[in-house]
Image (tube, helix red, strand yellow):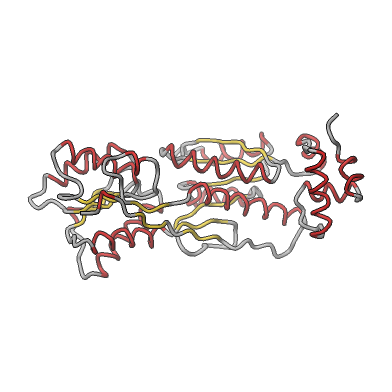
Amino acid sequence: MSATIKSVAEYAGVSIKTVSRVINNEGTVKPDTLAKVQQAIDALDYRPNKAARDLAGRDNYVLGYVYDNPNAYYILAMQNGILKECRSNGYELLIHPCDATNPDIIDELVNMVNSARLAGLILSPPLSEMPDVLHAMDEKGIQYVRVLSGDKAPDDKPCVLVDDYQAARQITGHLLDQGHRRIAFIAGEKQHHSTTERQRGFYQALADHGIKADPELVIDGTYSFGTGVQSIQQLLALPEPPTALFACNDEIAAGALFGARMQGVDVPEALAIAGFENSPFSTQTFPPLTTASQPTAQIAQRATSSLIRSLQARKRKAENHTIPADIFVPELIVRESTSR
């Protein structure tokens, strides 16, 4: 027979209400009492009934992850990180892919939240960076957390920051330290703020070394393998091709590496190539790619934790419950694609 909340309360020697507070992560239970209840839960292998929890309060125990991103590796890592935190806190997860350019995107999200009775949303770029979407969520009273590119929170709402600028500056600085002066940059979609931040870091590193960016070495593209293949053909056709390349993500970099090898260009002897994110693309190429390690799963887990804490604070009707923003700076990983 499965354990009940009553049997947990009796085992721990506390009231049913106290067990309920622990299960619902209300944060008002003393540490020693919390430890006793948790011990009872573990000993009895108690599993909270989600449906009963939903009926007992105004909030559902389901979060939604909404995304518009073609990078399958990024989405998988985000899902894994969110799921890990959800399971630790007794939440379920609804995953909702969408088209951020859809003119009805706001109605789509609001209807989804209402029909699924979601407690809150995890938003990743570009949705997390769309003011009209965020304004609509605020107007409807929908709780959310954002994953954003930057080093400073834009407001007091829950968010997790990724300092793409600083990481891109480090990558470009590494190429400059290798002696390269003619460095190309291939961008992803400009609707992602991470693209402009990585490009800004690229420009700043060049300026740090007194180098003016050459417009013919900067190519606008998409976060795709095909962009890398097409862009490298364009760059290698220049009268003076670049000696190094910084691609906005590993998928672009892998495409550029493939295109360069198809033309008989030796990497890294004739052309150094670096990517960004440290996705599986970076280690599945030959040679492996220098990149910036972005801990996407950890970022997702931290974002989910921030959202849950915000929901708990609202449930307690806490007046001051600002959740400090976490900042991640992707770490430079040097591999054979830039090592002569």
Left or right of residue 330, residue 26 in this image? right
| 290 lies above or below 211 | above
| Quarter in which the C terminus is drawn | bottom left
Whether 209 is drawn above or below 125: the answer is below
Q: Nearer the viewer, residue 127 or 245?
A: 245
Q: Residue furthest left?
A: 239
User: Where does residue 270 sit, x and y in percent of width and height?
Assistant: 15, 50
Total numbered badges shown on the rendered structure: 0
Q: Quadrant of the N terminus?
A: top right
Q: Which residue: 92% across, 50% down?
A: 13
Name which residue lies at 57% across and 39% down: 109
Q: Position of residue 213 (x, y in %)?
A: 21, 61
Would residue 157 appear left or right of 38 to someone viewing this image?
left
The residue lying toward the viewer, choosing from 297 and 133, is: 297
Q: Position of residue 224 (x, y in %)?
A: 33, 39
- Residue at screen point 35% across, 42% down: 283
Q: Nearer the viewer, residue 3 or 23?
A: 3
Whether 190 is drawn above or below 284: the answer is below
Residue 316 image offset from top left, x and y in percent: 77, 56
For residue 287, side relative to residue 99 (left or right): left
234 with respect to 141 (left or right):
left
Task: Please tell me which residue is depicted at 79% across the width and 48% down the height of the picture.
Answer: 38
